Image (cartoon, rainbow, N blue to C red):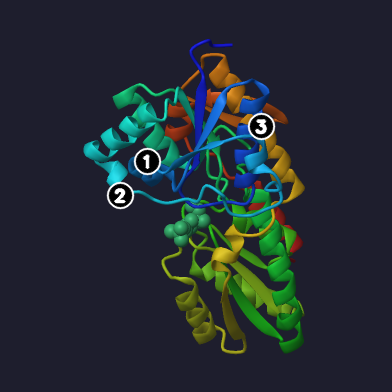
Amino acid sequence: MAKNIKRIGVMTSGGDSPGMNAAIRAVVRSCAYYHVGCVGFYRGFQGMIEGEYEELNARSVRNIISRGGTILKSARSKEFLTVEGRQKAADNLKKAEIDAMVLIGGDGTFRGGKILREEHGIPIIGVPGTIDNDIYGTNYTIGYDTALNTVVEAIDKIRDTASSHNRLFFVEVMGRDAGFIALNSGIGAGAEEILIPEENLGLDRLLDSLERSRRSGKTSSIVIVSEGDKIGKNVFELAEYVTKNLPYYETKVTVLGHIQRGGSPSCFDRVLASRLCVKAVELILDGKTDLMVGFLNNQIESCSLELALKSKPNINKDLLRISDILST
Ligand code: F6P
């Protein structure tokens, strides 16, 4: 155990995700277990800049494992993008006697942590928390599983009404740059078509596929559209385009939006968050820094933050083929 580590800071930053509270709890309780202090910073890097922090003990995190959101709140800080902002943040870390930080969030959070480390030498460990699952170095990010379940439950409900009225629904799901949510919820909910940013299948293919569905006797259909889809039209324009070209379809649009980010975390996310954060604290106590913890091939692993930041996780394109086969 590194003797120089007496107090560890923790914060959540960027888009919140279900399971972040389980992650905070695991950091705080691991610190208590290993007899080091723990300080929570509120509203991500912004709270660090404004000196908004609080000492946390094992009891501060009671009964939060089941709660969505993050008790430490989250923010996207413009001030932290400036040298002066980061200087204020570093000064406050010093004032709070922080020896190392656990940063829970996505790539923006890790980029911020890396620059803080480079400019001010603060050891950092990243923990991947985002519903998008778009982080290299882990098969799952905290919150992704819960978001998938939220989406599938919503689509199941949409399916009921789509089928009652013989309608075609376009359902937009989150994933600014990544199609993990769209692809996996699409298969899980039996969607007819799935549009993801990683693969532009084109408008003609979409029309052909919907036409084929109708001819095969389907009376209703669901098309899942990832918000970052590159087909060149947003979900409303897409629905309009299809109505114009296939007038026998009555189309409707549902944008699931931020309900995907909330809710009580699934057991999978709670366990994932717990395991990743125990590891994060242990890495710090072993004197490690500049790493991201991840869940790879059923094991808790770590990789360099730099690698996590410069690489993109691959989407399994075979799932598109599976979806094609199963939507016959
Ligand atoms: O980063 C996760 C994410 O859920 C994206 O899929 C989405 O585009 C974004 O957050 C929206 O975040 P906000 O409303 O906080 O800007």
Marks 1 and 2, how far apart in space? 16 Å
**Residue 219 visible from this viewpoint:** no
Query: Mark 3: which secondary structure?
Result: helix
- Three-letter amino acid code at the position of disc 3: Arg
Q: Earlier in the sequence, mark 3 or mark 1?
A: 3
Dividing the picture into quadrants, the one containing residue 117 is: top left
Instruction: Name the residue carrying label 2.
Output: 78
- Three-letter amino acid code at the position of disc 1: Gly
Marks 2 and 3, how far apart in space? 31 Å
- Three-letter amino acid code at the position of disc 2: Lys
Query: Mark 2: which secondary structure?
Result: loop
Crowding at label 3, few (<14), some or many (≥20) Cα neighbours within 10 Å?
Answer: many
Q: Earlier in the sequence, mark 1 or mark 2?
A: 1
Q: Earlier in the sequence, mark 2 or mark 3?
A: 3
Residue 63: x %, y % from top left: 71, 48
| Badge number at residue 29 | 3
Residue nearest the viewer, comparing 130 with 90: 90
**Point 56% across, 43% down: residue:** 129
Instruction: Name the residue carrying label 1.
Output: 51
Beta carbon of the mark 1 residue lies under 8 A of ligand 1: no
Q: Quadrant of the C terminus?
A: bottom right
**Point 48% across, 13% down: residue:** 4
Marks 3 and 1, how far apart in space? 23 Å
Beta carbon of the mark 3 residue lies under 8 A of ligand 1: no
Dividing the picture into quadrants, the one containing residue 87 is: top left
Kindly report which numbered mark, 2 or 3, lies closer to the viewer in this rendering: 3
Residue 169: x %, y % from top left: 62, 77
